[in-house]
Image (spheres, rainbow, N blue to C red):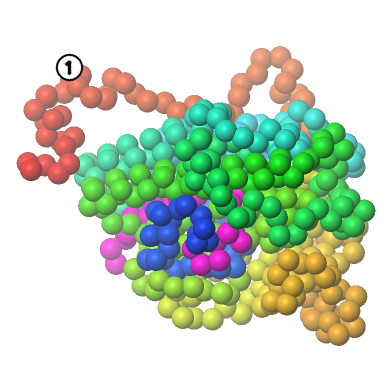
Amino acid sequence: MNKPNILILMVDQLNGTLFPDGPADWLHAPNLKALAERSTRFANAYTASPLCAPGRASFMSGLLPSRTGVYDNAAEFPSSVPTYAHHLRRAGYYTGLSGKMHFVGPDQLHGFEERLTTDIYPADFGWTPDYRKPGERIDWWYHNMGSVTGAGVAEITNQMEYDDDVAHHAEQKLYDLSRGHDERPWCLTVSFTHPHDPYVARKRFWDMYEDCEHLLPEVGDLGYDAQDPHSKRIFDANDWRSFDISEEDIKRSRRAYFANISYLDEKIGGILDVLERTRQEAVIVFVSDHGDMLGERGLWFKMCFYEGSSRVPLMISAPGMEPGLVAAPVSTIDVCPTLCDLAGVDMGAVMPWVEGESLAPLGTGAERASPVAMEYAAEASYSPLVALRHGRWKYTNCAIDPEQLFDLEADPKELENRAEDPGCAEVLETFRITAAARWDLERFDADVRQSQACRWVVYEALRNGAYYPWDFQPLRDASNRYMRNHMDLNEVEENQRFPRGE
């Protein structure tokens, strides 16, 4: 079997409800719409955990956070956990990353042979939550509502600088791969930080949404007292009492968010254009790590299992997978086994352990019977939360909160909790049995607390005395680039050209 090249395009905090069948019609995203036309599109794809680092570790490994130990944005991703980069590299692939993956710990590669950029977020334990101090806000890194009140226009920001760099290095790598110096198949992951807040966009993208009819949420702020217990904790973690959020703030935030989808579309279009012009074929995966509530119910950002936060876009363009819409719920933990399946890479050594399932059969009409599982054990939680999506139903549970049960076909906005409805007692009991077989919540809670306590000790210790950071330092050997005197000029010019002799 010829192993296909693989291009993974990952974005950050993109709400999957905006991708019911590819990008919504009103989004200005021509490149993603063109990609959607040739992709298997998963309308109900869910993150393994609605937060960056745990969601990404699960996406790469095919394991939920309770198995990786990556519970939050400061939890170390163990080097011993195989990722799709390990599996593909072991099978002979070049594996590279341009952009974000939010690895925490001294291993900043996790199977990637090469990283083209540094990460945008810190690699140390400084963002560790603390279940021993429920309700305590860590002001210098917790989200707050300043992203909403500060929404607007700028021509350069910290995040724009980063994503501009990510796209540039990805394009340059694709040009380099086209030269054929490395005969191995390749897997290049390009991972952007937009449309993650702050909600700030360049003016030309902002102007695209001047007359947008979607600048207000369909479900407005329910009010603090009407929120479920976990949503109240999110409100408190976001320091909502310190901000007065106006309707104009909401409109500007959502407008900038939509504008940044168009910004990403342009970046992705440039990458796909290089791929086409250099005559390289590849499996293409488009995915996000989690979503953004965007003001629905009064909630912003992520950190919960409601659709806006937990549902993500997922599209796969691959030989053998038919373009079209798949409605069955799937998970980002399914991406790792899917990539290996498409590449003909054997995962037998770890398959009894890996929780994800290949999505390739769904691209040829197969059915999926197993539920999708999610976990959350980070900021705004005081004990781990778990969820199951199966068929039309979504079930959530937490040791300290009432259960939730939503019928997503009848109630897509999740406004009616059916957990106490006698007519749903059988459905609820089935979910309870399934969840109890999968999770020991008491053990899960104990594991999280141990991890947090240990990391606080290590972090405080390493901040005393000389400090050696774990942040990835991309190195570029200038002595072997362009023309140098240990090279033959004629060979350099010929070998670095694609196509040659035309």
Q: Does residue 69 show up?
A: no
Q: Is residue 369 above or below residue 43?
A: below
| Total numbered badges shown on the rendered structure | 1
Give the quadrant of residue 271.
top left
Q: Which residue is mark 1?
A: 485
The x and y percentages for residue 136 are: 88, 36
The x and y percentages for residue 491 are: 11, 30
Q: Is residue 275 left or right of residue 252?
A: left
Q: Is residue 100 above or below residue 218?
A: above
The x and y percentages for residue 4 are: 32, 59
The answer to whether residue 405 is magenta is no
Q: Which residues are magenta?
A: 1-22
Q: Is residue 89 above or below residue 496?
A: below
Residue most toward the top? 465
Q: Does residue 185 show up?
A: yes
Give the quadrant of residue 465.
top right
